[in-house]
Amino acid sequence: MKRNLILAAVTALLFLAAVGGCWLVMHMPGGMVAVIRQDGKEVYRVDLSQVETPYTMSFSDGAGGENVVLIEPGAISMQSANCPDGLCMQMGTIRTGGLPVVCLPHHIMIEIEGSTPDAPDVQAY
Amino acid sequence: MTEPTRHSPLRRTLLLGLLAGLSLTMFLIEAQFPLPVPLPGVKLGLANLVTLFVISRFSVREAAAVMLIRILLGNLLTGQLVSFSYALAGGILSLAAMAVSHRLLKGKSLWFTSVMGGVSHNLGQMIAALCYLGWGGVVYYVPFLLVSGILMGLLIGLVTQLLLRAWVHTGEHPE
């Protein structure tokens, strides 16, 4: 019984830490520059605060996968995609730093800068 | 309850084949009902009921075989090459973590082994995502995947543990 208690305590701690992490991610400050990466390489960058009229951009992964991104003043989202799960379209619109919008099957990631963890080659472009 | 079975090789193969089929079925059924959470990688992991069962009653190696078959056929039937690599990454890490946990706990507290499995499965998929997408905001999904991994692992683990306990106590199992 003591073993179960210890394990339960460890699990609870891990859980609380994870929940805390979730909270942090959702309340992270961010900038206004949206960056779209495909296969890890940057393919588009736009300052959302400078956008005046909404427009779309299409991306293909070279294997039939198509993604259309909607760029609006202060917001960016995945308008359409022909991936199998369509999760990227459900992720909604992002306006600030934090969780990115990703289309895993097509290797596309949309995120808003100012909150990306520092990596050696991210800042150099 | 957590002692490995002592079947003949033929019987073992037959049972494992059945269990692999069961695992695959659970995987396919679960794939029909996506959770309403817009996060990639969040799922119940029903098929892990079987994986846990095999780890507990057979061996880690046989659990690995069953899981591999399930990942191979499951992704062949439902997915693309990409999802296969994600599933493989998650599966390998998950199995490794469960093997270690099961060994350290001497087969007890299966629920915790399951939690370890759930968490490491999601971490494995995160690692695969980082390989495909490069370092970036994807890592911000980690806390959410941890929460999901813990909860789902706990659920599956408790169910498996209770199942095993009930099964042994009925006295109707083959051994």
Image (cartoon, coloured by chain):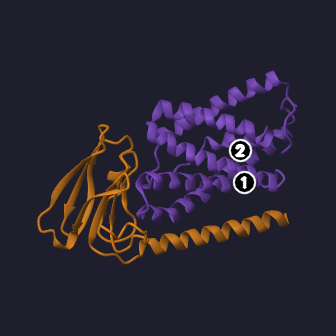
Quadrant of the rendering where the N terminus of chain B is positioned: top right
- Which type of secondary structure does the marked residue at label 1 adopt? helix
Is residue A95 shown left or right of residue B74? left
Label 2: how many Cα within 10 Å (few below 14, some 14–19, many 20+): many
Name the spot of residue B39 as percent of width and height, x first.
Answer: 44, 55
Is residue B41 shown left or right of residue A63? right
Q: Could you say which disc has been placed on residue A92 in the image?
A: none
Q: Which chain comes out purple in the rendered image? A: B
In the depicted view, which residue is nearer to us: B140 or B31? B140
Quadrant of the rendering where the C terminus of chain B is positioned: top right
Q: Is residue A26 above or below residue B69?
A: below
In the depicted view, which residue is nearer to us: A37 or B174? A37
Label 1: how many Cα within 10 Å (few below 14, some 14–19, many 20+): many
Is residue B101 shown left or right of residue A25? right
Q: Residue sitting at 20 percent across and 73 percent down?
A: A49
- Which type of secondary structure does the marked residue at label 2 adopt? helix
Task: Identify the colour of chain A in the image.
Answer: orange
* Amino acid type of the residue tagged 1 in the rendering: Thr
Name the spot of residue B158 as percent of width and height, x first.
Answer: 71, 52
Q: Do pointers 2 and 1 mark residues of a single chain?
A: yes
Residue that label 2 marks: B52
Q: What chain letter is assigned to the residue under label 2? A: B
Q: What chain letter is assigned to the residue under label 1? A: B
Residue that label 1 marks: B113
* Amino acid type of the residue tagged 2 in the rendering: Leu
Mark 2 and mark 1: span between their CA atoms? 8 Å
